[in-house]
Image: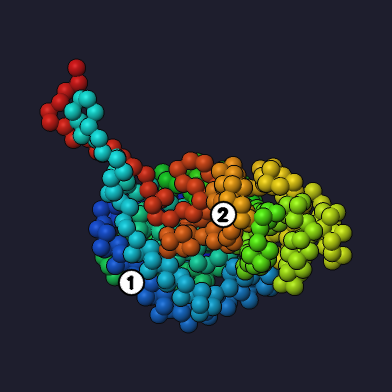
Amino acid sequence: MTEITPMTEAEADALIAGIGQRARAATLALGQASAARKTQGLHEAAERVRSAANALLDANANDCVRAEANGISAAFLDRLRLNPARIEGIANGLDTVADRPDPIGAVDQNWTPANGLNISRVRVPLGVIGVIYESRPNVTADAGGLCVKAGNAAVLRGGSDSFESSGLLIECLRDGFAAAGLPRDGVQRVPTKDRAAVGAMLRGRGAIDVIVPRGGAGLTERVFNEARMPVIGHLEGLCHLYVDAAANLDMARAITVNAKMRRTGICGAAETLLVDRRAANTHLLPLIDALIAAGCAVRGDEICQAADARVAPAVESDWRTEYLDAIISVRIVDGVDGAMAHINEYGSHHTDAIITDDAAIAARFLAEVDSAIVLHNASTQFADGGEFGFGAEIGISTDRFHARGPVGADQLTSYKYVVRGHGETRP
């Protein structure tokens, strides 16, 4: 696990070019690898993660000590930290990805036009996928496993906070893939904490075919501004929960606390609670009380402040803030129209949910809220590829083309047209 720092721009470009050249060679083998071989490789990788559990905990403890010394927030420390259950979750995710249908070679469409040619649209890998992410070591296994399942090579540049943890996870993947006869270079990491390597990845068109940013708004903005190759975007998770007047109070209370407090540092955590004005007298105070009892700070509008003296005043910037912490903003709105107007103005088109027993109101919300994921009577924390049955995700895409929502193996493919003729020539 070599750390190369500091680097000049030329050195960084040479590093990424070399990694990309090896990745390009690996894609040729991965694109032709059988479904059975990829499945075996992923299962082998999962077993190596389990076998390395103690070493992973030690490496992660070192990462956490350094991160705390650098003043990392509690929410980001939670994202960084591994424990036995999370390590088993990483291994289980690899197993689930392994057992999903192989997308490569699948025929999306087949037809014969008037010219007599038989035309098929067939799924193929994207190529070399670069992933730039921050503190969550599980992204290392998720991204590497999903890329290889879809026949792609992965070039991973994790955050400096998880340098040891991610490095060990990558070795587990590489060893597992090699045991199944797949190329070790199907997954490579950029072996430096120096940020010059990030710029080199973004300039590295030819070495890298697609870039996926997985981190905060600053990282994502830089990637969109500087990348010379297509980007599968993962914008901030400014997620909303709307409690309608027709919501069951017990359900609303349980979902609200879970959506905010289950894990505050993930992109699916609810950041704003919207309450129907018609439910203010019945639902507002119990929801605020439940959040505060769970350890959440509440910032609200004037009605919310009047309902509970513990509510701090919300300012305009609160409606645009992804807290990633035990803080939530609360606002009274005029029914579903008011909720949707607020979401469309302030949201990031990531994940938004409605709690109501009114099927017609729910149908309007699900149809008219323009977000990658919309939910009815369920927590926003289900915004996760594993919960969708993908086994893992490389991110939640908020783009409107190619891939949207949780990005699993199926979304890491493109297609080509295979045309079969019988001697036809065009007049």
According to the image, label 1 marks what residue? 44
**Amino acid identity at mark 2:** Leu
**Amino acid identity at mark 1:** Glu
Task: For label 2, count other residues whose C-alpha is less than 10 Å away and answer few (under 14), some (14-19) or many (20+).
Answer: some
Which of the labelled discs sits on residue 407, or is there none?
Answer: none
**Residue 11 location, x and y as percent?**
50, 53
Q: In this picture, is 345 found above or below 157?
A: above
Asked whether 55 or 138 is in front, the reply is 138
**Residue 365 location, x and y as percent?**
60, 46
Which of the labelled discs sits on residue 375, or is there none?
Answer: 2
Dot 2 lies on which element? strand
Residue at 46%, 79% in the rendered image:
53
Q: Is residue 58 left or right of residue 293?
A: left
Task: For label 1, count other residues whose C-alpha is less than 10 Å away and answer few (under 14), some (14-19) or many (20+).
Answer: many
Point out the frontmost of discs 2 and 1. Answer: 2
Q: Earlier in the sequence, mark 2 or mark 1?
A: 1
Alpha carbons under labels 2 and 1: distance apart = 35 Å
Residue at 18%, 28% in the rendered image:
116
Q: Residue furthest bottom?
A: 54
**Residue 247 location, x and y as percent?**
66, 58
Q: In this picture, is 54 found above or below 92?
A: below
Q: Residue furthest top?
A: 427
